[in-house]
Amino acid sequence: MSQELYQAEIVARAKAGQQDSRLEPHDARATVDNPLCGDRVTVDLALDGEQVRALGHRTRGCALCQAAAETLRRCAPGRDRTLAEQGRKAVAEFLAGGAPLAEPWRGFEVFEPVRAYPSRHSCVLLPLDAFVAAATGRDPDGR
C-alpha cells in the first residue's frame, strides 16, 4: 500500500505541508481533528471581502493529510470563500470514483491512488473540512 499511495508528488507535498504556514493576522481560523487517527489541521484565511487572499495551515497528521493541506494552500488563494463547500464536495466525489476535478481543485487529482482506500479518504478531506469551517464560520460538524 505504501508505494501505491505515497507517490513522489504526494511525498513532496507532504514535506512542504510539514512547514507551519499559519497566518498572522488572519480573518478566519478553524481547527478540526480526526479522533480516530489523531490528525489535526488548523486553517487560517486572509480575506479581501469574500476572496481568499491567502491560506495558511498547521497540520499534524499523516503524509496524506499534510499533502492535502499543502495542496489546499496552493488552490484556495484568489478564490471566493463561498466555494469552500463546493470544493470539499467535489474532492470527496472524486475520491469516491467520480468525475475529474475542475479548477481550482485539479491539484487534488494527485490523490487518485487514494480512491482505492476509502478508509484514507478522511485524511485527504480533513484540511478541506477545516477550510469549510473557517470560510463559513460554522464548526466542522456543520452547526
Image (cartoon, rainbow, N blue to C red):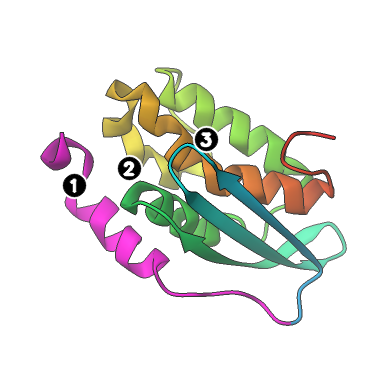
Region of the chain picked out in magenta, as a range: 1-24
Give the foreground label among 2 and 3.
2
Give the foreground label among 2 and 1.
1
Give the foreground label among 3 and 1.
1
Disc 3 crowd rating (10 Å Cα; few below 14, some 14-19, many 20+) is few
In the rendered image, residue 72, in percent from the top left (x then y), is placed at 52, 54
What amino acid type should be assigned to the residue bearing mark 1? Gln
Q: Which residue is mark 2?
A: 110
* Image point (37%, 23%), residue name: 118
Specify which label sits upstream in the sequence, 2 or 1: 1
Disc 2 crowd rating (10 Å Cα; few below 14, some 14-19, many 20+) is some
Q: Which residue is mark 1?
A: 7
Q: How many marks?
A: 3
What amino acid type should be assigned to the residue bearing mark 3? Ala
Answer with left or right where residue 117 lies relative to residue 5. right
The answer to which quarter of the image holds residue 142 is top right
Is residue 24 among what the camera can see?
Answer: yes
Q: Are marks 2 and 1 in contact (CB under 8 Å)?
A: yes
Q: Is residue 36 magenta?
A: no
In the rendered image, residue 64, in percent from the top left (x then y), is placed at 35, 47
Which of these two is toward me, 8 or 77? 8
Which of these two is toward me, 134 or 111? 134
Is residue 77 among what the camera can see?
Answer: no
The local secondary structure at tag 1 comes to loop
- For the N terminus, the image quarter is top left
- For the C terminus, the image quarter is top right
Q: Which residue is mark 3?
A: 102
As drawn, which residue projects farthest toward the bottom?
A: 24
